[in-house]
Image: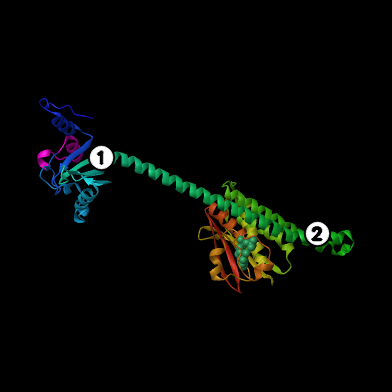
Amino acid sequence: MLRKSNTAEPRDLGDQFALLVSGVVDYAIFMLDPAGVIVTWNEGAQRIKGYTATEVIGRHFSIFYPPAEVRNRKPDWELEVAKREGRYEEEGWRLRKDGTRFWANVIITALRDETGRLRGFGKVTRDLTEWKRIEDLRNAERDAEVTRLHAHADRMAELERTKADFLNLASHELRGPMTVIRGYNSMLADGTLSPGQFASVARLLDLKLAQMDRLIEQMLETARLEHDDLELAQETFDLRFVVQEQIDILRPLTRDHRLVLDAGDPAPLVRGDRTRISTVVANFLDNAIKYSPDGGEIRCSACLRDSRAIVSVRDEGLGIAPEHMPRLFSRFGRLPTEENMNIPGTGLGLFLCKEIANRHGGDITVRSKPGVGSEFTLTLPPV
Ligand SMILES: Nc1ncnc2c1ncn2[C@@H]1O[C@H](COP(=O)(O)OP(=O)(O)O)[C@@H](O)[C@H]1O
Ligand SMILES: [Mg+2]
């Protein structure tokens, strides 16, 4: 853009050119003497930097630089480079008269006469603040996009690992009960089993089938959680009946454990998904039985305590070492203990229990002592 000048007609080409420069408004174009003192000023310089010609001519050009750069003698250094190389160019922050910053593209050119003597410097400055703002915005958007893509890639890799873990688990954990079922089936087929043994074999097969059912159910529930479509039913029910039902289901499957229930009044009524809360209780009981291989008492309680609805299951089993506590509720979080090698499990049970409890506004807590036993407690908001 060129501002129309109302000066008298220029006499020669040199004057015309000076006029052209003085009228340019998009660029600050001015000259410095060899020491860096400002000797000319144009429209653009006034517009960009805010000084009028009279205010600025005769002053050192370092007034345009932030104080830290002046202290580091950057302006002098720029002139030094221009003197040595003929030209200096950079982009950086400069100051306006009112103290505000602008992002400048700066070119300093050394001006020499025919004998090569330095006469001063030409300086052309452009205000790129708006351009830089858009550029910064674009970079920020690009960074955000890169972060998003990385997060997506991480998530895909995580899903891939989960899938591999699932497949390993399914094949390993299903093979155990299947081998037992196949063994009894062949004994049935070749007549090795007498009718007198049928009842106890049927109980054992039930146990193995239940194990397979649980594995499949846990894998499906974990997959639902992964895809975030675990829909909870909304029913009101009494926790005492849920615990009683689960005890009734499990009691015939164990001879070494005494399952007892302390069910107090008033009724621990809760609202939520009855089937899933039953699963939590079933897993507590299943764990209590599995992880007390020498048998013992398993004492359950279902009651209202401190205005919370509570189910707890206490066993006299292996117990859990304090250092293993953080792992308990993680996905596939089986504890790396010697005893666990021979006890089947997926490490999904407590992970799912915690999720289900949390989604009902409740929680699960544990107290345990190695060699003495464990107590798992589910706490839910009462109705
Ligand atoms: N009552 C318990 N006593 C001792 N250890 C337990 C008990 N309950 C759970 N654990 C430990 O916590 C781990 C995670 O439990 P869980 O998620 O139910 O997995 P799983 O029963 O399939 O192994 C178990 O592998 C076991 O080591
Ligand atoms: Mg379990």
Q: Which of the pair 74/379 is nearer the observer?
A: 74
Q: Horizontal placement of 189 versus 61: left or right? A: right
Residue depicted at x 45% and y 44%: 145
Label 2, secondary structure: give it. helix
Q: Main secondary structure of the magenta part?
A: helix
Q: Which of the pair 312/199 is nearer the observer?
A: 199
Amino acid on which the number 2 mark rests in the picture: Arg
Q: Which of the pair 120/267 is nearer the observer?
A: 120
Tell me where residue 152 appears, x and y as whole percent. Answer: 51, 48
Circle 1 residues within 10 Å: few <14, some 14–19, many ≥20: many
Label 1, secondary structure: give it. strand
Tell which circle, 1 or 2, labels the residue nearer the N-terminal end.
Answer: 1
Mark carried by residue 127: 1
Tell me where residue 136 appears, x and y as whole percent. Answer: 35, 44
Label 1 vs label 2, nearer the camera? 1
Q: Horizontal placement of 99 versus 297: left or right? A: left
Magenta region, residue range: 41-55
| Snapshot quadrant of residue 97 | top left
Q: Horizontal placement of 134 versus 312: left or right? A: left
Circle 2 residues within 10 Å: few <14, some 14–19, many ≥20: few
Amino acid on which the number 1 mark rests in the picture: Asp
